[in-house]
Amino acid sequence: MTDVMKQLRDADPARPGRLDAVDEAVFAALRDDIATTSTRSTADLAEAPAPTTSRRRRVGRRGAVAIGLAAVLTGGGVAYAAVHLFQGATGEGLTCVRTWNADTAAGQHVDAAGSWRTGDPYADCTTLLAEQGLPPIDDPVAFAWDGQTVVAPADQVPDGVERLEGSQALGTGVVELRRTVEDVVDGGRGECRTVAEGAAWAQGEVDRLGLQDWTVVEQPGTEGLPCSDYVVDVQDRQLTVSASEDPYQRLSTPEMDAMTAALRERIVDRCVSLDKARAVVDDVFAPVDFEFPTTDVVDESAGCARVDVLLGGTIDVTVYGPSTAR
């Protein structure tokens, strides 16, 4: 293991108790001062070097992969935990707790927190807790609190809150929309599109995901910004497309470029099942000496598997697809 990746692993927030390592003042500042922050903006913290080679360059030795990927991870350790705490305290994700009190109401001293994986608060909390090395919550209840979604034991649910009926608190379509606009493989960050091209692509994604009550808003282009960026507004059910620099360049390294190219070639350009796509993901990221979340989502309505890869804090991968490709 390289020194860089050893430092990241030694500070691994996925171990039990790492969320409590975040200073309360840090989290308060995140929540108060960055109220509109999303996963996309956390990537701005990464000081990745500008790419000097083609995205098709081959991956080098294991150590090079680790160092290259470390450049696009936002700090690891406590910084990564703070990002996930912030996501849990906003519409970006959910918070999972076994004991409810004034601290947890403020988003502090929680058992697990992070971005939505499937839109099912119970399944997603089980996943987030497992990443902390913790068992699922007994008799869980999902409820809304101050703009966030919380899962807690039934006997810990505060009086007078809105309990979320059913498993789909957010909806799988909205969750995937958030992920596809951040995806570096073939999503919003995978290609430089003009604002017009980005709006057309965004409308196609909204239609594909069956979000009939959503609208795509195209903002005028800005001179000198040739590409497009996307903002998902769940409350207004709106996807805004605006001009930006190339959304991938800040995240690009030769190692990451080769991995995304491999995923395009072996999943996007072919028609494979969910299991085969997951095997490809595991193989492509095998040289990465760093723990990161990977979520499988069964979608029998799809003919082929697809994959979303998000960068920023860690590598967050979701694989969607049918049990049998057709």
Image: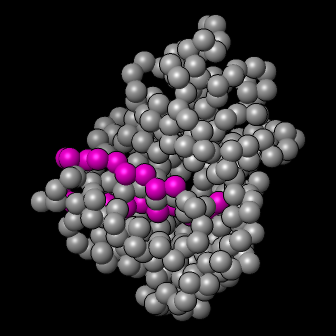
Residue 249 location, quadrant: bottom right
The residue that appears at 39% across and 22% down in the rendered structure is 166
Q: In this view, does 234 lie to the left or right of 109?
A: left
* Quadrant of the snapshot with the C terminus: bottom left
Is 158 or 49 nearer to us in this picture? 158
Residue 5 location, quadrant: bottom right
The residue that appears at 31% across and 64% down in the rendered structure is 277
Q: In this view, does 16 lie to the left or right of 94?
A: right
Q: How many labels does the image show?
A: 0
Give the residues in magenta. Answer: 293-313
Q: Residue at the top extreme?
A: 159
Q: Can residue 209 be seen in this view?
A: yes
Is 39 or 313 nearer to us in this picture? 313
Percent of width and height locating residue 262:
38, 78
Residue 155 location, quadrant: top right
Q: Is residue 222 visible?
A: no
Percent of width and height locating residue 196:
40, 64
The residue that appears at 55% across and 35% down in the rendered structure is 135
Please determine whether, in this image, residue 145 is positioned above or below residue 126.
Answer: above
The magenta stretch spans residue 300: yes
Q: In this view, does 242 lie to the left or right of 98?
A: left
